[in-house]
Image (cartoon, rainbow, N blue to C red):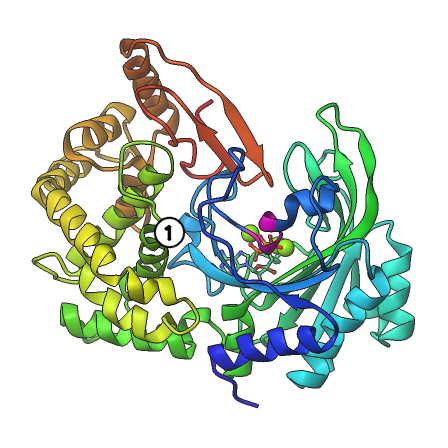
Amino acid sequence: MYMSTSEIRTAFLEYFRSQGHQVVPSSSLVPHNDPTLLFTNAGMNQFKDVFLGSDTRNYSRATTAQRCVRAGGKHNDLDNVGYTARHHTFFEMLGNFSFGDYFKHDAIGFAWGFLTEVLQLPKDKLLVTVYQSDDEAYDIWAKEMGIPAERIIRIGDNKGAPYASDNFWQMGDTGPCGPCTEIFYDHGDRIWGGPPGSAEEDGDRFIEIWNVVFMQFNRQADGTMEPLPKPSVDTGMGIERIAAIMQGVHSNYEIDLFQRLIKVVAEITGTQDLENKSLRVIADHIRSCSFLIADGVMPSNEGRGYVLRRIIRRAARHGRLLGAKDAFFYRLVGTLAELMGDAYPELKSQQPVVERVLKQEEEQFSRTLDRGLTLLEDALAGLGDARQIPGDLVFKLYDTYGFPADLTADVVRDRGFEIDEAGFEREMEKQRERAKGASAFTVDYNKQLKIDHTSEFVGYGQLQGESPIT
Ligand code: ATP
Ligand code: MG
Ligand code: MG
Ligand code: MG
């Protein structure tokens, strides 16, 4: 059964409304009142205090289509864009929430009901994971939903630390957390990849579509797990991933919305080859950039604004790869507003602002982009057999030409080069020392982001995932 992305959104919210859930609007990408969070990256963010019991609502069940950005932090999806079938910097998370109301039984029942009855997905293409010791969830899947044992996978603490598991969701070093169960879809053996928990799980064959979290604890700074006032439920399903399934395609980038965007990027840049990776990157980036600006983020050299700037600059560089001579990125905003403006009216009302900001930012960067690229190419040619770009060059590109280090890494990645992150960080450290009055703090949310604050330079801890500057 084919469904468009917006039909899926409506069907989801209607299904949960009919099950007694309050339909709550998406919150802003800029988290309200939560300095521990870079951008809204999950539907539960706006309900964090409700889970903790320090805020109450006049409903105990809610459902949302939440705009999310995952372009900063420890598990930064920015570097996945263009390389996997399933990751975006901006995506929409469909979710249902129980605040001390229903728990495991209904949470699983609702998810299974939506997928197999409303969307009518074939049951034999779905498999699920549960937290190693969660026999209760296992039994609900096995006995009540009738899933055969070979398609229920237990995942334990596989990352060497207690509760560090794909099936134990935590908000951060502290905050709401609990075991979860996840639902995967098998796109078929033509595609490389293995089931969750296997050595090949990083492939794109078995794609995670829905995470159902049983919120049970408030993790304390010393690692102890304090029970929440009431066991609760938080779920999240990426709309683009479920749209791919409903539209009979494998990659998120093949769904209705992305096909339209990609076509327009191809037209504007005169690109014939619709498989060109840069088209996907640009189609992804126009969404995160437009929504971030519409939510009030402006390009800058620190914090949230620097993440935005980095994404715009990557898009500008991919435009160059496709042959764009002038600022082109802003010309996509109108198409995006057409495609998503009904669900997100702010996109329409803010369109002129978004266009102006993107145009200005791209024009400004264009002045140094070509020169920086030339410098980089010359350096590459002089590297001989070395496969690492020296840190002082990465720093020079950053400092003089405005190349965020992740952009440099992106430029050289396909040719088998990587950047010397440690060397770059040493240069950054020197620069920081030169700056007076530096103060630093680090926060961790959902193990996904590190925000680094210094008076000179903020928000650079997102480089290549594992090396936050703290
Ligand atoms: P993955 O393992 O594929 O990176 P995840 O485990 O990080 O996903 P969760 O934090 O569990 O994702 O988020 C809930 C759901 O949101 C996922 O099951 C997926 O459908 C969707 N999702 C997560 N990250 C992205 C992304 N970068 N782009 C699109 N959808 C995403
Ligand atoms: Mg992820
Ligand atoms: Mg996962
Ligand atoms: Mg997950």
Q: Is residue 398 above or below residue 229?
A: above
- Taking the view exactly as shown, the residue that stands out farthest to the bottom is 1
- The magenta span reads 42-46
Is residue 43 found inside the magenta-colored segment of the image? yes
Whole-percent x and y of residue 426?
Answer: 35, 18
**At 14% from the left edge and 48% from the top edge, which residue is drawn?**
360
Q: What quarter of the picture does the N terminus occupy?
A: bottom right
Using residue 174 as the reference point, say whether residue 369 is left or right of it.
left
- Taking the view exactly as shown, the residue that stands out farthest to the front is 58
Label 1 is placed on what type of residue?
Asp
Whole-percent x and y of residue 178?
Answer: 76, 46
**At 57% from the left edge and 68% from the top edge, which residue is drawn?**
205
Tell me if residue 205 can be seen.
yes
Q: Is residue 184 above or below residue 113?
A: above
Q: Dot 1, crowdedness within 10 Å: few (<14), some or many (≥20)? A: some
Residue 114 quadrant: bottom right
**At 72% from the left edge and 60% from the top edge, which residue is drawn?**
59
Most prominent secondary structure in the magenta stretch? helix
Q: Is residue 259 above or below residue 87?
A: below
Using residue 8 as the reference point, say whether residue 456 is left or right of it.
left
Is residue 314 found inside the magenta-colored segment of the image? no
Answer with the quadrant where ligand 4 appears in the image: bottom right
Using residue 226 as the reference point, say whether residue 385 is left or right of it.
left
Foreground of the two, 314 or 377: 314
Q: Would you name the residue on which mark 1 appears?
A: 295
